[in-house]
Image: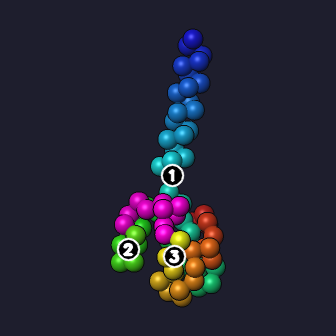
Amino acid sequence: MWLCRQLFFIFYLKACFVVTQSTTWMCLICGWIYDESAGSPEHGLPPGTRWADVPLNWTCPECAARKEDFEMVQI
């Protein structure tokens, strides 16, 4: 029973980390960076907006590239 609780706790922490971890996306056309934790309030995306929640019709503020022209990057 103790081992079962420990494993549950470990998996719970990992799941929470994955959900709360923010990512960074880069426009492949112009290089503009979108950071989920910072968002882009001046372009209608409040801080904390996950990339999955960005509307499909949203476009890059620099070059008007589509959402599908972005790629996740590590900075």
Q: Is residue 49 magenta?
A: yes
Residue type beneath disc 1: Gln
Could you tell me which residue is drawn at 59 percent across and 18 percent down? 4
Q: CA distance from mark 2 to mark 1?
A: 21 Å
| Residue 53, horizontal then vertical, whole percent | 48, 62
Is residue 61 depicted above or below 22 in this figure?
below
The residue that label 1 is drawn on is 21
Tag 3, which secondary structure? loop
Q: Which mark is residue 44?
A: 2
For mark 1, give the secondary structure. Answer: loop
Which mark's residue is nearer the viewer, 3 or 1? 3
**Which residue, given by chain and number where applicable, does mark 3 sit on?**
57
- Dot 3, how many residues are within 10 Å of its Cα: few (below 14), some (14-19), or many (20+)? few
Q: In percent of the image, x 37 and y 66: which residue is there? A: 46
**Tag 2: residue type?**
Gly
Corner quadrant of residue 1: top right
Please report the bounds of the magenta region as a residue range: 46-55
Q: Secondary structure at mark 2?
A: loop
Inter-mark Cα distance, 2 to 3: 12 Å
Q: Earlier in the sequence, mark 2 or mark 1?
A: 1
- Judged by its main secondary structure, the magenta piece is loop
Residue sticking out furthest to the bottom: 63
User: Disc 2 vs disc 3: Cβ atoms closer than 8 Å?
Assistant: no
Q: How many marks?
A: 3
Q: Is residue 63 within the magenta segment?
A: no
Please, what is the three-letter code of the amino acid marked with disc 3?
Answer: Asn
Residue 39 — which label? none
